[in-house]
């Protein structure tokens, strides 16, 4: 079972007020129903959604839906649920703000459908049930989308989402308009809004685990980079000291430079901080990291000068 299916299954069990049921049903019918003069037809592969719609029509309008179950032959082994509702003189469609008093289709629902905050949340819940999907947070990316058939209506839904600061956006698709949310925190907020509480807990657990894992990986990478930096620095310093030793010998160095050169050769993998601590203990006086760094710069300058002169001599001989 996909994560989207689990979320939808959870929110179909929510019990609310009649006005919220109407708002939810209005959004669902608007996005996932075929309506003609005689029937409202709804197709879904989700048995929980079929049961939810059946129950809402029965409780709100005392209408018994006709349900037909068919096997899906589109390379799938699951079933398709067909619900057929016969509205009474269009009263239901008007009540759900699908058509107006003149029997014309209403693209944007009337204000009474989303009159307060709870009804707005119920309307968004109906939208998700009818045309929404969400990636499993265990996958590589976070993504929630609602596929809408009309530009004006997609702008309305997008504005409704952003009343809750969800930072949703619209993109044109071949078959309509996709409203999407990609921020993990905002997707969690959306799940809270539609009251998918179990899904919120699962989503946040996975998100926190992934975040912790990513932070751990970043720390490990930083630590590894620091280790490599220390080793590379120590190798360059050792090469400089070896160059001086081979060409002119360490005895020509002043006392402080000779000391640091000898200790670097004795501890080739130590960091500057570690080397300063070792020398401070051995000499019974504080030798700072910055002091060592200053001495190594002098040694590098001397080694570079030796290499440069050696190169000139080789060029002259050629």
Image (tube, grey):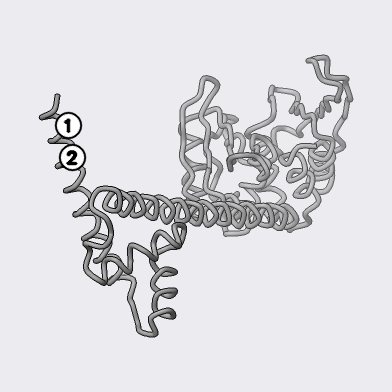
According to the image, label 1 marks what residue?
314
Q: Which is more toward the observer, 6 or 113? A: 6
In the displayed orientation, state which residue is furthest to the bottom. Answer: 284
215 left or right, relative to 20: left
Q: CA–CA distance between discs 1 and 2?
A: 6 Å
In the displayed orientation, state which residue is furthest to the left. Answer: 316
x, y (%) of residue 270?
45, 62
Q: Residue at x 22, y 63 (%)?
A: 253
69 in relation to 232, above or below: above
Local secondary structure at mark 2: helix
> In which quadrant will I find the N terminus?
top right
According to the image, label 2 marks what residue?
310
Q: How many marks?
A: 2
Q: Which is more toward the observer, 121 or 34? A: 121
Q: Which is more toward the observer, 271 or 71? A: 271
> In which quadrant will I find the C terminus?
top left
Instruction: Answer few, some or many: residues within 10 Å of disc 1's Cα (few below 14, many 20 plus, some between 14 and 19).
Output: few
Residue 19 appears in view: no
191 left or right, relative to 1: left
38 in relation to 256, above or below: above
Instruction: Please report contact status of discs 1 and 2: CB closer than 8 Å, yes or no.
Output: yes
x, y (%) of residue 154?
50, 36
x, y (%) of residue 137?
66, 45
């Amino acid at each position: 079972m996909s994560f989207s299916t689990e979320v939808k299954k959870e929110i179909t069990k929510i019990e609310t007020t009649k006005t919220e049921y109407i708002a939810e049903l209005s959004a669902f019918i608007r996005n996932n129903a075929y309506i003609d003069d005689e029937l409202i037809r709804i197709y879904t592969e989700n048995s929980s959604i079929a049961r939810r719609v059946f129950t809402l029509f029965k409780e709100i309008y005392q209408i018994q839906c006709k349900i037909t179950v068919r096997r899906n032959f589109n390379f799938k082994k699951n079933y398709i649920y067909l619900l057929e509702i016969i509205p009474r003189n269009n009263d239901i469609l008007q009540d759900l703000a699908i058509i107006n008093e003149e029997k014309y289709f209403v693209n944007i629902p009337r204000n009474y459908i989303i009159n307060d905050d709870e009804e707005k949340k119920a309307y968004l819940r109906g939208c998700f049930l009818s045309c929404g999907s969400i990636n499993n947070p265990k996958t590589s990316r976070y993504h929630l989308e609602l596929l809408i058939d009309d530009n004006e209506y997609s702008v309305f839904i997008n504005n409704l989402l952003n009343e809750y600061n969800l930072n949703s956006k619209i993109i044109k698709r071949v078959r309509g308009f996709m409203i999407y949310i990609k921020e993990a925190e905002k997707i969690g907020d959306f799940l809270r809004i539609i009251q998918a509480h179990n899904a919120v807990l699962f989503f946040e657990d996975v998100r926190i685990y992934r975040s912790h894992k990513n932070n751990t990986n970043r720390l490990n990478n930083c630590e590894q980079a620091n280790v490599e930096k220390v080793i590379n620095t120590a190798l360059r310093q050792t090469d400089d000291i070896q160059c001086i030793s081979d060409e002119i010998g360490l005895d020509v160095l002043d006392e402080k430079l000779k000391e640091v050169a000898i200790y670097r050769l004795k501890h080739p993998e130590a960091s500057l901080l570690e080397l300063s601590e070792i020398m401070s203990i051995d000499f019974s006086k504080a030798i700072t990291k910055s002091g060592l760094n200053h001495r190594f710069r002098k040694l590098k300058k001397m080694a570079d000068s030796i290499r440069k002169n050696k190169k000139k001599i080789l060029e002259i001989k050629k």
